Image: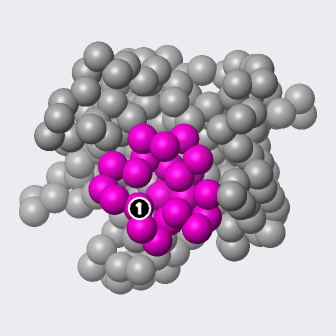
């Protein structure tokens, strides 16, 4: 379930949005929901399509980090990392006006043993939030969607005063990360300008 607060006025625009709508701060959140909830993984999950996605939530244009682990034609796996950075309109290309908002993606090939280490670390990380927990967009959290053996598993961890440290699996993931940009852990909404981009909640399945 997706609960949206503060962006009702823009919902009517979604049906007529053109490619590149993510350049609008309010509308780009709508396209982000499917990714965060792993709806594409869920729709295609079979015993032959193992995949994993881990997302670190933060301020949309500076803190978001997305990892996708997918099989290749060989026994290897591809780990893709997407990191969003501060939007730079000077990089605009008339052929792709949404490019500056899409983030930077880097990829590397990892072995089956690396995938097993990631999965083992995930399974060993304690205290994921309960199903039905609301994840506010102005909080730091991890949400992981995995298709394993034809079944979908979704887990999430909130970072707050009771859990200020990154979950244990993050160290394993970061050791394989081809992008060395550090994870930011400052508050998501630092000022009123940030809040104007809207707040929403995602409910953990």
On screen, residue 72 versus residue 181, left or right, reads: left
On screen, residue 5 versus residue 25, left or right, reads: right
What range is drawn magenta here? 10-35
Q: Which residue, as the protein is rendered here, is positioned at the far left?
A: 73
Q: Position of residue 164 (x, y in %)?
A: 79, 27
Q: Position of residue 63 (x, y in %)?
A: 55, 28
Chief SS of the magenta region:
helix
Which residue is depicted at the point 25% across and 27% down?
Answer: 92
Which colour assignment does the render follow? one colour
Which residue is depicted at the point 61% across and 57% down?
Answer: 10
Seen from the viewer's position, the closer of residues 54 and 71 is 54
Q: Is residue 9 shown to the viewer in this render?
A: yes
Circle 1 is placed at which residue position? 17
Figure quadrant of residue 46: bottom left
Where is the N terminus found, in terms of image quarters?
A: bottom right
| Label 1 secondary element | loop
Queried whether the magenta region covers residue 107, the answer comes back as no
Queried whether the magenta region covers residue 22, the answer comes back as yes
On screen, residue 181 versus residue 12, left or right, reads: left
Where is the C terminus found, in terms of image quarters?
A: bottom right
């Amino acid at each position: 379930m997706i609960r949206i607060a503060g962006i009702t006025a823009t919902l009517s625009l979604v049906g007529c949005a053109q490619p590149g709508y993510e350049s609008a701060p309010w509308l780009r959140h709508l396209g982000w929901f499917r990714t965060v909830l792993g709806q594409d993984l869920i729709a295609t999950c079979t015993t032959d399509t193992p995949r994993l996605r881990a997302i670190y939530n933060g301020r949309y244009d500076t803190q978001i980090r997305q990892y996708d682990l997918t099989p290749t034609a060989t026994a290897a796996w591809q780990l893709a990392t997407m990191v969003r950075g501060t939007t730079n309109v000077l990089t605009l290309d008339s052929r792709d006006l949404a490019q500056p908002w899409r983030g930077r993606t880097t990829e590397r090939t990892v072995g089956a043993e690396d995938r097993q280490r990631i999965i083992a670390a995930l399974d060993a990380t304690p205290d994921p939030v309960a199903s039905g927990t609301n994840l506010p967009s102005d909080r730091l959290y991890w949400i992981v969607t995995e298709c394993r053996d034809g079944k979908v598993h979704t887990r999430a961890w909130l970072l707050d005063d009771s859990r200020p440290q990154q979950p244990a699996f993050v160290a394993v993931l970061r050791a394989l990360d081809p992008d060395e940009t550090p994870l930011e852990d400052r508050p998501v909404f630092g000022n009123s300008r940030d809040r104007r981009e809207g707040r929403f909640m995602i409910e953990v399945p």
